[in-house]
Amino acid sequence: MTKPLIGMTSDRRPNASGVAMYESNPSYSRAIIRAGGVPVILPQDPALAESFASLCQGLVFTGGNDAHTQTFGAPMHPQAQPVDPRRQDFELALLAACDRHPELPVLGICFGMQLMALHAGGRLHQHLPDLLGPGAANHSGNHRHPVTIATNDSVLSPPLRPQSAPGETVVSAHHQAVDDPGRLRIVARAADAVIEAVDDPSRRFYLGVQWHPERGEDQPLSLDLVASFVAAAAGRLPATVSTPPE
């Protein structure tokens, strides 16, 4: 049977010998595979962004360190842990390529959502402790907290619920958050009003979430989200990757 090819961004870090390596948490791949997709890690070459947007049936902008906000006219916070600038350059080129392919399903996770908002003309809260004080701990260290879906017409709503079910939680690990989503729409918030999800309602599937759905293996909200994303990507088949029958 044929499955959708899902391109995933990755970190760029030096190994013990100082050689730059691409790094991806296996939880991203596991989540895509579980939902029926074929994950591939994309090399960070801006010149290939258009090719990736054309070849893949869906793209995941994964989590990572903090954006270089000076690129968008804002100084970086002293507590920022900047992402490798080559990664940011590549992902901005990839987002621009996605703009030229509005039918391409896109899922941004944590840093991925924040970069989507910056690309759309938005801005960030660069250090949540400055905004929330001790309450910022609710968003770090894989803490679980509830979210409320703010619309009934986003990809988070059907087949999900307009309001999160009592006790339903998501996994968070971040110290920055979206302050203004720019051209994007706010579709979910935490109880403390931190923006938890944004989308572009004019596109088929263009969603960013502040939490980590790939770590929510026991959370219906996160499982359904990844499944909906891969299903949207499958709608763009025929793909070029075939897998043996199960």
Image (cartoon, rainbow, N blue to C red):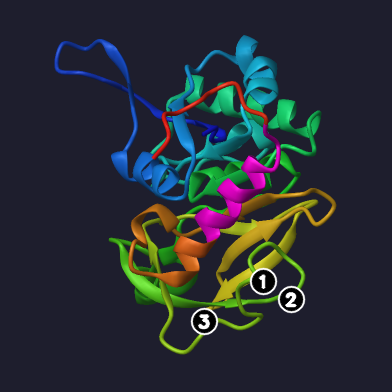
Left or right for 140, reference 163 = left
Residue at 49% over, 24% down: 87
Kind of residue indicated by mark 1: Ser
Question: Which residue is pictured at 48% across the width and 51% down the height?
Answer: 110
> Between tags 3 and 1, which lies in front?
1
Query: Which label number is shown at residue 152?
Result: 2
Mark 3 or mark 1, which has the lower sequence index? 1
Residue 57: image location, x then y, percent: 63, 33
The kind of residue tagged 3 is Ala
Residue 157 badge = 1
| Residue ID at (28%, 61%) | 141
Q: How many marks?
A: 3
- The spot of residue 41 in percent (x, y) is 44, 25
| Mark 2 in CB contact with mark 1 (< 8 angstroms) | yes
The magenta segment: 225-237
Q: Which amino acid does label 2 sit on?
A: Asn
Quarter of the C terminus within the rendering: top left
Q: Under tag 1, what secondary structure? A: loop
Q: How crowded is mark 1: few (under 14 residues within 10 Å), some or many (20 or more)?
A: some
Camera-nearest label, 2 or 3 = 2
Which residue corresponds to mark 3? 191
Sequence-wise first label, 2 or 3: 2
- Residue 121: image location, x then y, percent: 75, 44
